[in-house]
Amino acid sequence: MKQKEKVIAAEFEPLVVGKKRPSVETQLGWYRLLHQARLLDEKARNYSKQSKGWGYHASHVGHDGIQLALGMAFRPGKDFLFPYYRDMLTSLAGGITPYEIYLNGLSKADDVAGGGRHMSNHFGKPSINIQNVSSATGNHASQAVGVARGIKYYGDDAIAFSSQGESSCSEGYVFEALNGASREQVPVIFVVQNNGFGISVPVAEQTANPIVSDNYTGISGLKIINCDGTNPFDSIAAMEEAVAYVKANGGPVLVHASCVRIYAHSNSDNDKKYRTDEEIAECRRRDPLPRMKHHLLEVESVDPIKLLNIEEENKELINAEQDRAEAAPNPDPATATLYVLPPESPIASISETPKEGGKMISFLEGVNQAMKTEFRRNENTFLWGQDVASKEKGGVFNVNAGMLQEFGNKRVFNAPIAEDYISATANGLSRYRKDIRVVIEGAQFADYYWPAAEMLIDSSHDYYRSNGQFCPNIVIRLASGGYIGGGLYHSQTIEGWLLNTPGVQVVMPAFADDANGLMRHAIRTQGITFMLEPKFLYNQIFAKTPDPGDDYEIPFGQAKVRREGKDLSIIAYGTPVHWAIRAANQLAQEQGIEAEVLDLRSIVPMDMAAIEATVKKTGKVLIVHEDKISGGVGGEIAARIVGNFFEHLDAPIFRVGAPDTPVPFSKILERAILPQVEDVYAKALQLAKY
């Protein structure tokens, strides 16, 4: 046997133990996990080849040392772990059982990550705080910062762990995470597993520094530890140092682990097209499993029978769990549409009649007052964004006036000009406890929200992807729309895009009391809600209403008839509601035509019952919105009306909106682009005479 093991020694690099040498029993525990994960990896590759499961599989082999160390450092139910798609051994060592790994790989109904809703090899177990992350590699780094922010705020001694490959470090949001964690000094450990390739792109074509952590040496307050990710001893020592540092200093650590990728990137990749046999053979010399076995036999003098027994026990377990998982039920097709949106909160008090004696408030004040009452009601409510907490400046439009002074800088604070980071940390903080509510100014203007688009898409999937186990509770406030002479990046509106993003709720009020009631309901309700605030209306006298009171709350999906009519219906939301009312009054005065005006208020969900009622009442429909006609909300409303209430129509559906062009800066040009009262009047008159 010893002669045979010497052959192994010649084929593989020996492990360097370092200063700290754990007990043999501890090392045998490591070997059990390393071998168990290797068996699972082999099973996954076989399933994939046979097209019987694991439609996606990325092997962890060559990352074994750092994944063992990371999984063992994580404390289930205490810490928060954000694994990435290669983290099979991390997940196994962290508390996901072999059976649960099979359920994920086979996309079974009982998959603890998401019931088969997410890609295979994307491991998670929310019940023990192993997070169900997306396929956008590395974007969970800022989510980990967000939950670490919660750990720090609530005085917990937990740690957030974020794991990723080196290629994801080329993404801007990874720098945002490292920069933000360093600035805030939160307890998060970033683990970068560098195997030298991003699919087929070598690290030299990703970054100037082959040791990727060298890119971040200039970030003050970020502790950097480099280790050999193929060596369990070095990796565990590195993770222990990282944990000790966080506990002693509270701040972030970046652990960079040098790994090898022994197999192709994934089951859909052919690495023979870009790697030579010699390169792959050199990687195999660093394969952690046979090196660990050789160490136990030659250095620790472990009886070979003991290792053989561990291997046989693992095989028996893995085979038994395979049979059990294959027999487990598949997802029920009837459940495919569940968990897109969470249930709304119960309405505490709802009345369309404002309280008596309420003073007149502006649209801006309506939003502001709702936030303040909710911050008083729930001490686990937070606000951040750009410019929201700079002494007396409560945001670009001062909507947050007084928030900093009343609730303090720990609950109301400024964020970097990094829209993705703003949204991602909101997602992360809401993971810490279910009663947390986060309000963010997602960007200074709605037009600037685009850098956060990837995080919005990621977050919009969370409730669905986790099979209803996790729901980010975020209200994203955006000053939206034109009529202010703002021009490009200051006058666009984005509800057309949001309508096509399952998993988000979207409201756009036109009056102060609606702004108040919808904002209050958005904060109280689970999920992601976009509060699109037409900034033109912030201080307009015609948008003012009496103060509806501190308990006023409007549920989503309830439209409101602003003007009764019998001859045609004008459906609108946001600023054009006011143009519709004016045009309807003008039609009545000049033409004797009575137009009904329906204010949607809520775009997602949409009040189809109210739309049906007005269609049946008048038989003619004009849809008005500020957004572009092409791809706008109006086209969707028209399609729903035709598909459901066609027999009640007496004329084609007409629309008024902006042409397919950006909103220009010149007020003369802007007026030519955005819908005006006269546009609504002319189109409504044409419809009435049809």
Image (cartoon, grey):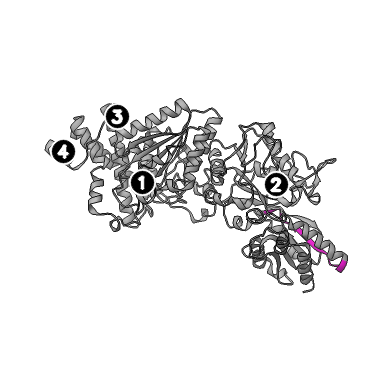
- Pair 2/1: label in front: 2
User: How far across and how far down the image is residue 26, in percent?
Assistant: 29, 29
Residue at 70 percent across and 70 percent down: it is 647
Query: Which residue carries the number 2 mark?
Result: 518
Query: Which residue carries the number 4 mark?
Result: 5
Sooner in the amino-acid sequence: mark 4 or mark 1: 4
Give amino acid for label 4.
Glu
- In the rendered structure, the answer to whether residue 574 lies left or right of residue 102 reads right
- Crowdedness near tag 3: few (<14), some (14–19) or many (≥20) residues, C-alpha within 10 Å: few
Give amino acid for label 2.
Leu
User: In what element is the residue under mark 1?
Assistant: helix
- Of residues 50 and 630, the one drawn nearer to the viewer in this rendering: 630
Sooner in the amino-acid sequence: mark 2 or mark 1: 1
Q: CA distance from mark 3 to mark 1?
A: 29 Å
Query: Which residue carries the number 1 mark?
Result: 324
User: How far across and how far down the image is residue 55, in percent?
Assistant: 38, 55
Q: CA distance from mark 3 to mark 2?
A: 57 Å
The part of the image, by quadrant, that contains residue 300 is top left
Query: Which residue carries the number 3 mark?
Result: 26
User: In what element is the residue under mark 3?
Assistant: helix
- Of residues 159 and 336, the one drawn nearer to the viewer in this rendering: 159
Disc 2 and disc 1 in contact, CB within 8 angstroms: no
Q: CA distance from mark 2 to mark 1?
A: 49 Å
Visible residue check, residue 322: yes
Span of residues in magenta: 590-602
Q: CA distance from mark 4 to mark 1?
A: 36 Å
Q: Judge whether 682 appears above or below 559 on screen.
A: below
